[in-house]
Image (cartoon, rainbow, N blue to C red):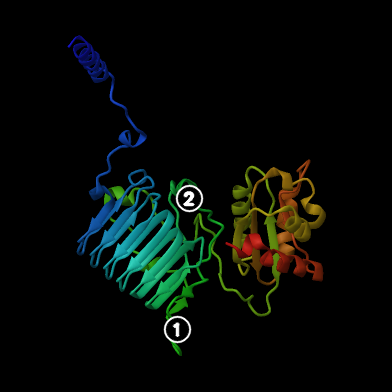
């Protein structure tokens, strides 16, 4: 009896001791509860809705069952699905993952994303910054163009989403379900500034969204794989330095203002390994590859492009005591080889 009583007493004391210990907490217990309604827009008919900067903050989002409406998502997003929408204007802020449109028709969609997919869609105008090939499936009458957009918070939102404004494969569309003798998609030949309705709501319009090429944080690129017949091509590399994005934007602004007929065929931001860097740049890369920063590349086309790029680069490089900021290929066979080498290097082709 004494032994049994002692053992039970010991167990009881342990139970009392355990009951006074604080409950364990885990990381998922500390996460703020998410209300799905805050990240969903649905059943909108003839209306206007949206989200202001800072209100989505990288969450997933859903847009569904909307008709003849305007929707503006002015923040960075994780992924978004847009389902069963018709005759809508939709702006999607920088999205880390995919923008997936399903069963939509007659919509104008402006989006920046890591990936774009459509399925069972018809008659869409897509203004894109897409880091990978846009993919269409069972979709018809799709028109694609280069996204042009700006508002004060947009560039910072690109950084939060992990997207580069210089990596844009908007025109490299992959049709998963091609039809013999038919073309399911085409390239827009002009800007759609007039066709994209801007917000009227006081709070949404106060953000300052613009889809005009003037002031766009996304460079306008032709996106076509073949060079324009009869035009010269020059590759400009913005070499690694702390303000290389700013330098790239300044270069584009200077080039397009001085030579209106010059255009950017494509832009890329890549980290080159040392063999590729030496093959493309030769001695110009000496001492720069160890910085670990990316190169911004601009393939410029148009009459007089080489001379204009060279002059601007000389102006930018003047006063640089150590390394140049810009490298411009020459109008020689060596320069043409450098262009080809850059476009063929794995860091570029794997994007």
Residue drawn at x 68%, y 48% is 240
Q: Which residue is mark 1?
A: 183
Mark 1–mark 2 distance (CA, rounded to whole Å): 32 Å
Q: Answer left or right for 22 relative to 141.
A: left
27 is higher (above) or lower (below) than 230 = above
Which residue, as the protein is rendered here, is positioned at the far top? Answer: 2
**Residue 147: image tag:** none
Residue drawn at x 60%, y 74% is 225
Secondary element at tag 2: helix
| Neighbour tally class for label 1: few under 14, some 14-19, many 20 plus, Cα within 10 Å | few
Q: Position of residue 245 (x, y in %)?
A: 60, 49
Q: Which residue is mark 2?
A: 158
Q: Position of residue 141 (x, y in %)?
A: 38, 79
Q: Position of residue 208 (x, y in %)?
A: 38, 51
Q: Answer left or right for 188 relative to 276.
A: left
Which residue, as the protein is rendered here, is positioned at the far bottom? Answer: 181
Quarter of the picture containing the N terminus is top left
Residue drawn at x 77%, y 69% is 337
Secondary element at tag 1: loop
Q: Position of residue 103 (x, y in %)?
A: 29, 71
In front of the other: 175 or 302:
175
In front of the other: 54 or 161:
161
- Sooner in the amino-acid sequence: mark 1 or mark 2: 2
């Amino acid at each position: 009896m004494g032994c049994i009583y002692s053992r039970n007493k010991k167990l009881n004391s342990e139970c009392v001791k355990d009951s006074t210990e604080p409950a364990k907490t885990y990381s998922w217990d500390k996460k703020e509860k998410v209300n799905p309604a805050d990240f969903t827009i649905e059943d909108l008919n003839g209306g206007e809705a949206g989200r202001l900067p800072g209100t989505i903050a990288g969450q997933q989002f859903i847009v569904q069952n909307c008709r003849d409406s305007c929707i503006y998502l002015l923040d960075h997003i994780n992924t978004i699905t847009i389902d069963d929408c018709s005759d809508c204007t939709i702006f999607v802020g920088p999205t880390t993952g995919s923008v997936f449109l399903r069963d939509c028709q007659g919509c104008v969609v402006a989006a920046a994303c890591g990936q774009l997919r459509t399925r069972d869609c018809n008659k869409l105008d897509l203004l894109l910054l897409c880091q990978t090939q846009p993919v269409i499936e069972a979709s018809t009458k799709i028109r694609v163009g280069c996204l042009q957009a700006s508002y004060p918070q947009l560039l910072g939102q690109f950084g939060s989403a992990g997207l580069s404004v210089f990596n844009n494969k908007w025109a490299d569309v992959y049709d998963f379900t091609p039809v013999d003798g038919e073309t399911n998609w085409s390239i827009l030949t002009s800007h759609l500034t007039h066709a994209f309705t801007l917000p009227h709501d006081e709070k949404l319009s106060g953000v300052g969204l613009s889809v005009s090429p003037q002031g766009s944080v996304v460079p306008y690129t032709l996106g076509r794989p073949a060079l324009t017949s009869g035009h010269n091509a020059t590759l400009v590399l913005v070499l690694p330095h702390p303000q290389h994005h700013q330098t790239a934007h300044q270069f584009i602004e200077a080039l397009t203002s001085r030579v209106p007929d010059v255009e950017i065929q494509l832009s890329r931001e890549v980290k080159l390994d040392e063999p590729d860097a030496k093959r493309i740049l030769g001695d110009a890369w000496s001492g720069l590859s160890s910085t670990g920063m990316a190169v911004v590349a601009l393939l410029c086309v148009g009459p007089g492009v080489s001379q204009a790029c060279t002059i601007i680069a000389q102006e930018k490089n003047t006063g640089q005591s150590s390394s140049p900021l810009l490298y411009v290929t020459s109008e020689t066979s060596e320069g043409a080889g450098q262009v080809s080498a850059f476009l063929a290097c794995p860091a570029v082709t794997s994007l």
